[in-house]
Image: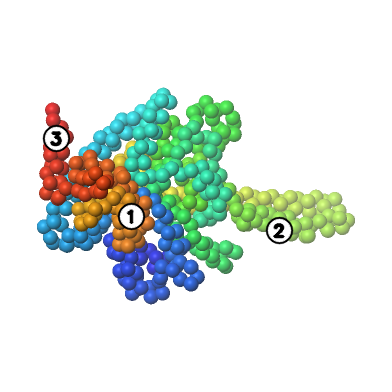
Amino acid sequence: MAQDAEYYHNLINQGYSSEIALQYTQQYFPHFSLETKEGPSIGGTKSEMHPKGCFIPIKAHSLFKVLLDEHFGQTSEQNQKMNDLIKMFQAIWHHDLHNNLLDLKRLYDRMSPNNSSPNYPRETIVQFLDVFEQTLTDGNWDEISDEEVQEALDGEDVLPISLVVRFDEFRVKRLYKLGERREVVERKSLFGLRKEKFEVKIFENVISVLEFQDEKWFGESKKRQRQKIDGDLSGLHLRLFKDVPHLDLEIIFPNTSPSMRSLDKVKIIAPLVGGVFSLGMKYIPLLFGGASGDTSLSLLGGILAGLGTYMLKTYTTYQKTRENFRKIVAKDMYFKGLANDETVLTYVVDLGEVQEVKEAVLAYVFLFCQTQPISEEMLDEKIESWLEQRFDLYVDFEVDDALRKLDKMRVLITDDAGHLSVVDIDTALNLMDEYWDNLYNF
């Protein structure tokens, strides 16, 4: 992302409105604009820059601060009570989802690669995946389709490397994404003489769920055994990555082989071809020029020695290129990796918890401040419009899920006409306190 665009989006994530963020950004980058004559300076139209999804990427504390300051004022008594109500929402959902986390860890324990000898029946992995996918759905994750994976394999990569993934080595392969944005990146071509800019799709969070084939499967073929990556592959492997370009999605797989681009192949083969041509031009005429036998043998030896040197140089260049490819992937993955195995479960549940609270608080505040009867559809539109105006976010707000949460807490009121409202803050605090006190009644 360009420096001006990055500065702008950092302000948005801190809670500034799009108008104020634009003003501040233009103080440091006078030529910055959301859209220019050549096209959007930060890649695509607004809707393309912020593809609509259910995920609310703004930090919870920034969201709540702007929401309460705008509706209640910074120092009012109502503002303080709403902060207390938010704390109760957070405590209750943390408690409820903590139990979900314990269930996930219990199911995952037998199939974790960290287990000294993972041993589990197929029905266990099916049961775990069902619970795990439901948790992801509650946290607004989406599954990455096979079509998106194929687009990544077919498309031109952002990183200067192409990889071949051996998909047949997986018994289970599931990929999930959360958050998506567009960025303009720069790539060099013609040996660095030309620079071109193009727009790419970035998955902000990606989870891979992989289970490899067993040892028997790898042992059925020498090729499979030769390509098998080192180490114990047993168990169900969970990995979490951040900021993965769609077209470079293959870098998250552990069992890849570098596939050299045409330019890299030319760099390797050209010295060999040039060397053979040079040797031919120098020695072939002498061989057919009637030289003596001894001289011919000497010339032949010189040709073979020179040819061997060029072949060795070509092989060395090939190995060096492959090693450079591996370094590129390793370096990129070092900064993109966030969590492995059990820690992925904690991250997913924590992120889902925050999303649940954001949705519930947004719905409660907008209903509380509503002076006219409002329907579910009107509430949905009102919250989505506010998120767009205040944070430049294009969110498909899950209003039905938010109302379900409020109803569970007994703070939602629905009249015969289907109009919505909520109890006052004091009553809501009492209801929450009562709910909390009765969580355990042994």
Picture coordinates of residue 29 (x, y %)?
38, 73
Q: Residues within 10 Å of mark 3 (few under 14, many from 20)?
A: few
**In the image, is 415 to the left or to the right of 190?**
left
- Judging by the rendered image, the residue that carries numbered circle 1 is 381
Q: Earlier in the sequence, mark 1 or mark 2?
A: 2
User: At x 19% / y 44%, what residue is drawn?
Assistant: 411
What label does residue 274 carry, if any?
Answer: 2
Q: Disc 2 marks which amino acid? A: Gly
Q: Secondary structure at mark 2?
A: helix
User: At x 71% / y 58%, what residue is drawn?
Assistant: 274
Residue with the most extreme right position:
290
Q: Residues within 10 Å of mark 2 (few under 14, many from 20)?
A: few
Q: Is residue 207 visible?
A: yes
**In the image, is 174 to the left or to the right of 317?**
left
- Judging by the rendered image, the residue that carries numbered circle 3 is 438
Q: CA distance from mark 1 to mark 3?
A: 35 Å
Disc 1 vs disc 2: which is toward the camera?
1
Task: Assess whether mark 3 and mark 1 are in contact (beta carbons under 8 angstroms).
Answer: no
Q: CA distance from mark 1 to mark 2?
A: 67 Å
Q: Disc 3 marks which amino acid? A: Asn
